Image: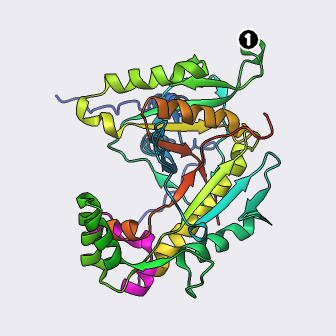
Amino acid sequence: MAKFRKKKQGGATGINTSSLPDIIFMLLFFFMVATTMREVTLYVQVTAPEAYEIQKLEKTSPVSYIYVGKPLQTSIFGTDVRFQCNDQFKEIDEIAEWVVQERQILPEDQRPRMTVALRVDEETHMGVVTDIKQELRKAQSYRINYTTRKKDN
Amino acid sequence: MARPLSPINAGSMADIAFLLLIFFLVTTTMDVNQGINRLLPPIPEEDAPIPEIRQRNVLEVLVNSADQLLVNNRFMELSGLRDEAIEFFSNPYMSDELPEMTPITERMDGALRGGDTARYRQLRRAYETLGEDVMMSRGVISLQNDRGTSYKMYIRVQDELTRAITEVRNQLTMRLWGVRFSDLQEETDMDKIRAVQTVIPAAISEAEPVNIEGR
């Protein structure tokens, strides 16, 4: 004869958390795939402008970055627009030299494809950007990319 | 006698995963490398001859320090720039005011006569891909900005012009193959992309910087 035993009426059972690590791992993998390593520590404030028609930088071409904007630590560096080339501040007349150095580091076959990405704050005046472009032309580095955010239609 | 296996305590697994997660959150950024690609022109030599360009082939776009647009001496809102540029590059009614449209074969002859074999080969490849009833515009947009123009405005103008060029390319690819230019795949349609880019180049020229109104 079948016996029906009434379940023990214990206290509230704990929530099963054994799948918690799985969920966290899923999040972890998402972030590992969707993000890229920070190249440098930013010393300047850069809010990239928005644009509709944007292209991705070629994956194969080597990229150097110039960040242009107001310094984050205004108490130390002032409020004037400064240029950060990869990881250090440069004056405007040092940029051409820096670009040439950056190109020298690369293997010879990649040098013509070097791209300089300009990450310029949207509040900057064009005079500053024009100066940089002139310096790049002096250094015979003609490929540039204005970094922008994607604007939604 | 075999002892029953006690389960491994996995309670701290979540903590370890959290630690890793937070590490990646801090050290990585979301932004990808995307933007507007441009090729700067070399610095012209001192005594270089100024190439002669007819007035009708130039669309002069000026941006002043108050972010206002002047297109061929007419005041214009940013929203109207794209249509202006599309009309400029495609010249749909063969107007005398807008740039000359020449058949691709004529351009090939011109390159051959000028001894520019690299250009000839480039045009020849485009011709083989696109066929002969393709017209090429001689139009060039001349973009000039003031030192006081905001970078935001400059990028918007560049963007509108790029959109115009993409639109003109779309019109061509829609007519030939019924697809949009942006839908052509790099892996399979590289020759088509190259050909369209040859026939409709991103003809935006930036004037040598001048300082009109100061900073």
The answer, for residue B170, to whether it is visible in the render is yes
For image coordinates 60% across by 82% down, the residue present is: B96
The magenta segment:
B172-193
B47 vs B44, nearest the viewer: B47
For image coordinates 60% across by 22% down, the residue present is: A92
Task: Say which quarter of the image contains residue A15.
Answer: top right
Quarter holding the N terminus of chain A is: bottom left
B83 vs B147, nearest the viewer: B147
Q: Is residue A65 above or below residue B131?
A: above
Is A128 on the left-hand or right-hand side of B173? right
The picture places residue A72, in percent across and down from the top left corner, at 71, 23
Q: Is residue B159 above or below residue B167?
A: above
Tell me which amino acid carries mark 1: Ile
Q: Is residue A97 above or below residue B183?
A: above
Q: Chain of mark 1?
A: A
Task: Say which quarter of the image contains residue A141.
Answer: top left
